[in-house]
Amino acid sequence: MKSIFTIDIEDWFHILDLDSAPELRQWDRLPSRVEGNFRKLLDIFDEMGVRVTCFFLGWVAERFPNLVKDAAGRGHETASHGYSHALVYRMSEDEFLDDAVKSRKIIEDITGEPVRGYRAAGFSATEDTPWFFEKLIEAGYSYDSSVFPASRGHGGMDIDHYAPHLVKCGAGELVEIPLTVIDVIGRPHCFFGGGYLRLYPYFLIRKMALKVLDEHRPVVFYVHPREVDPDQPRLSMNMKRRFKTYVNLKTTEDKIRKILRDFDVTTCASYINENVGVFREVCAEEEYVGAV
């Protein structure tokens, strides 16, 4: 069974919910490292012969359109990570809609191809944003990968649907590709991206990924360009947050290579195209938490 590999394309200073993180108006004045880090990842994907989904922050796409063109030119899917990297539950419905539309249009203008997918900053769709799916459909998206089915610092959503599924609401329907968790001692845990991927040893990541596949679910892996950059500048933060943000940066590249060696990965769009009939058959009559 195929799994899904994704990148959330942001720069080293796009750290959420941190007093020392620069504001949007300051981003242009900061030294960027996203170009070199992202192209390092693209070269790894070329070397391993895989295609992935690239969730571009709209601000990054606007400032570095050649990165979007390069990703699309190498056969990867380009998708949206919103424009301003704002947490969904701190935006109004209209603010979220404007941000999601702006990012989609920027990326589409660069590639000339439609953008189907969206991922929220910090996976911050929650039960407190019941309008989230309605507004995504209104913004022109046909799938989402923002739901984190476990408790976490920036949200999380308590759902029963661990596998990709259809979401039906008043505005229409879209496919939800939740981030992958697996129950351990009765509680959902993630091992497959970001700080989780950096923290856990690879043998455990692989073991848990195989268990997910045994449950007939794809593993959704995710990384950020800054996670293959051990020499990136550090933002000021407390010790706990510093550990979570910067732990094991030197191990990420090797883990990515092992994942791509050991698992058959594809893009979100390709996975949906191959399985949408199954989603409809299994989920057509189910109602999603928060759907209107």
Image (spheres, rainbow, N blue to C red):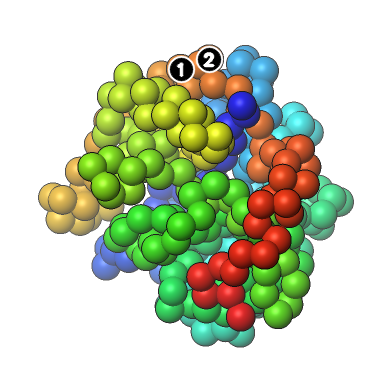
Q: Where is residue 36 in the image (x, y as percent from the top left)?
A: 53, 33
Front one among 15 and 279: 279
User: Mark 1 packing: few (<14 Cα in 10 Å), some, or many (20+)?
Assistant: few
Indicate the amino acid at tag 1: Lys
Q: Position of residue 211 (x, y in %)?
A: 42, 29
Residue 60 left/right relative to 205: right
Image point 66% across, 52% down: which residue?
A: 282
Residue 227's place in the image compared with 55, above or below, is: above
Callout 2 touching callout 1 (CB < 8 Å): yes
Crowding around mark 2 (Cα neighbors within 10 Å: few <14, some 14 to 19, many 20+) is: few
The C terminus, quarter of image: bottom right
Asked if residue 245 can be seen in this view, the reply is no
Q: In this view, does 166 lie above or below 268?
A: below
Q: Nearer the viewer, residue 99 or 163?
A: 163
Instruction: Place residue 173 in its image quadrant.
Output: bottom right
Which residue is pictured at 23% across the width and 42% down the height? 185
Q: Nearer the viewer, residue 100 or 34?
A: 100
On the question of residue 191 being in view, the answer is yes
The percent position of residue 174, horizontal first and vertical second, equals: 70, 62
Q: Residue at x 46, y 17 (%)?
A: 258
Question: Count of labels shown?
Answer: 2
Circle 2: element type: helix
In this view, the residue farthest toward the right is: 112
Residue at mark 2 to residue at mark 1: CA–CA distance: 5 Å
Q: What residue is shown with label 2?
A: 261
Q: Quadrant of the N terminus?
A: top right
The type of residue carrying mark 2 is Arg
Quarter of the figure with residue 122:
bottom left
Q: Residue at x 75, y 72 (%)?
A: 172
Residue at which label 1 appears: 258
